[in-house]
Amino acid sequence: MDYKNAGVDIEAGYKSVELMKEYVKGTMRKEVLTNLGGFSGAFSMEAFKNMEKPTLVSGTDGVGTKIKLAFVLDKHDTIGIDCVAMCVNDIACAGGEPLFFLDYIACGKNYPEKIATIVKGVAEGCKQSDCALIGGETAEHPDLMPEDEYDLAGFAVGIVDEKDIITGNDLAEGDVLIGMASTGVHSNGFSLVRKIFKMDEESLNTYYDELGTTLGEALLAPTRIYVKALRSIKEAGVRVKACSHITGGGFYENVPRMLPEGKHAVIEKNSYPIPPIFTLMAKEGNVEEHMMYNTYNMGLGMVLAVDPADVDKAMEAIKAAGDTPYVVGKITNGEKGVTLC
């Protein structure tokens, strides 16, 4: 008896690392001091020593049951983008610059080519956010997970000068809410998605005119990364007063998280176009409107608040970064919470 016969293939692990190296290399920043394959990743803070009060910010997350669609369609090259996005968007939401990322893949059996494809997506997400992929772990779990399944999670660290942390504490009545367009469902609410639609190849490969693509392609569209848009706003000299990443819990849970006591957000539902995937989901699943807004981003992946005088500059900065902004509402005095009208 040996380890391989027990279900863990060490050689497959070595091959996975070799295959993923080319993707990881493309994410490197000059601050990275170690190579892939070491016991830890080292990152120099020398470039940030001139900050008044350099502050680390971190985020960790996975992609939830969206991963089930990747299994059915045997498509694993974008799920890693989702994993990175869920972490770095949270860091950017606090005003931070993502610095480095580590991934964790647990699998029933290590298929090196599949693992490398997953990491290719992780590396792409890191490149989209200028974040270095400095380490990770692939764990083979025979008897705990089916051989053809895996789970993916990640952890990111970023930095911000303490004075630039986005807290929402200086929000004022009349401040304007700007929403940035999502790419669709992103990585939340897929337990409900999987109840609305059949999760088989035939269903996911069905083409819908209103989507302009197959159902599977629409649902697997990777989560939008907003790091560069928020950086562009900062470089334009605009102070983001508050920011919310619209993830699980939709508007009703996430928007209040950016508000201090005594401030209320009012969002106009007709101020931006709702992507057709959400309309289709509501119709096919008979999901009432409040539940849709309480579960999904409904077309806005990030909502931020700025002073009315800064709206035009913020909108232009977002566009310059390649994102699509909409003025979607305002801040009022009142009980902490959000009203959709």
Image (cartoon, helix red, strand yellow):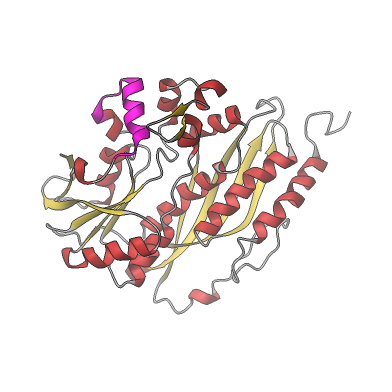
Across and down, in percent, residue 20 comes to 70, 51
From the viewer's perspective, is 221 left or right of 117?
left
Q: Nearer the viewer, residue 246 or 158?
A: 246
Residue 99 vertical position relative to residue 140 in the rendered view, above or below: below
Q: Nearer the viewer, residue 71 or 55?
A: 71
288 inside magenta stretch: yes
From the viewer's perspective, is 266 left or right of 189?
left
Across and down, in percent, residue 23 comes to 66, 55
Q: Is residue 165 visible?
A: no
Q: Is residue 298 visible?
A: yes
Q: Nearer the viewer, residue 285 or 207?
A: 207
Main secondary-structure element of the magenta-colored stretch: helix
Q: Residue furthest right?
A: 1
Q: Which corner quadrant of the image does residue 73 belong to?
A: top right
246 inside magenta stretch: no
Across and down, in percent, residue 313 comes to 26, 68
From the viewer's perspective, is 169 left or right of 11?
left
In which quadrant will I find the N terminus? top right
Across and down, in percent, residue 32 comes to 62, 67
Provide the residue span drawn in magenta.
274-290
Residue 282 vertical position relative to residue 329 in the rendered view, above or below: above
Residue visible at 30% across and 31% down in the picture: 292
Q: Residue furthest bottom?
A: 50
